[in-house]
Amino acid sequence: MSALPETGQAPEANHLAVQHLGLADYESTWRSMQSLTASRTPDTVDELWFLEHPPVYTLGRNGKQEHLHDTGDIPVIQVDRGGQVTYHGPGQLVVYALLDLTRRRLGVQSLVRLLEQTVIDLLADYQVPAHRRDKAPGVYVEDRKIAALGLRIKKGCSFHGLSLNVDMDLAPFKRINPWGFSDLEVTCMASLGIDTSLDATASRFQGHFEKLLHNT
């Protein structure tokens, strides 16, 4: 497991520090995000974290227990992000965006759109058309969800972020109502015929994200 990044280091206000954390425990990563956000100053550097988690279900602030069916031995953690229940596991690229939205003059919905567009542009690199849906944040290929979003904003700063299914076991999604939808199908890049690694996907994601962020 990679060490969690130290917080509060800010060489430049508009710099984006990128951390590759590997396979990281969910709760300790979450607490580290909270700590960074709580200790931020106007000069704290923004960060983008790339990682994957061991199997875990997370339930957002307004999440309903009725959307959990047979979670078995996979832990369920109630968290402070928006949204309903989702699953994280190996082979899924998790991207946490710790940004000072006030400093960047970026609204919450603008950040959501930016994250969604990053995935849409990434999949377009592989000639896979993808789209967003109104009132159902995330990215979809046809009717199947491939990327999910859940954010928390505190002191004008964001944490949590996005998960993109790269090459993972999708079976745990069948044990819940993903994001509160009982009939929603889930897919991953491997199921779409895309042969790539998490590291390569993270690199592509970073390139598209920084381009969109700087053009905002």
Image (cartoon, grey):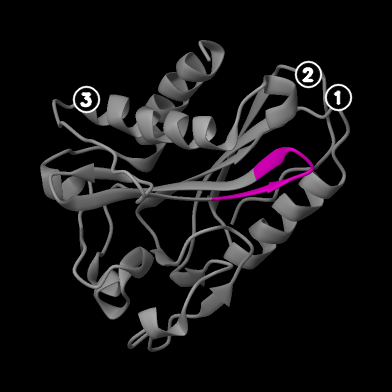
In reply to whether residue 152 is colored magenta, the answer given is yes
Q: Residue at x 67, y 33 (%)?
A: 99
- Find residue 70 and report its image quarter: bottom left
**Residue 32 percent location from the top left of the image:** 73, 54
**Span colored in magenta:** 151-158
Q: Earlier in the sequence, mark 3 or mark 1?
A: 1
Q: Is residue 6 left or right of residue 206?
A: right
Label 2: how many residues lie within 10 Å, few (<14), some (14-19) or many (20+)? some
Dominant secondary structure, magenta: strand
Q: Amino acid at mark 1?
A: Asp
In the rendered view, tell whether residue 209 sits above or below residue 170.
Answer: above
Q: Residue at x 68, y 30 (%)?
A: 101
**Residue 169 percent location from the top left of the image:** 26, 64
**Residue 74 percent location from the top left of the image:** 43, 80
Q: Are marks 2 and 1 in contact (CB under 8 Å)?
A: yes
Name the residue beneath numbered marker 1: 43
Q: Nearer the viewer, residue 161 or 132?
A: 132
In reply to whether residue 60 is colored magenta, the answer given is no
Q: Earlier in the sequence, mark 2 or mark 1?
A: 2
Q: Amino acid at mark 2?
A: Ala
Name the residue beneath numbered marker 2: 13
Q: Amino acid at mark 3?
A: Ala
Q: Nearer the viewer, residue 148 or 8?
A: 148
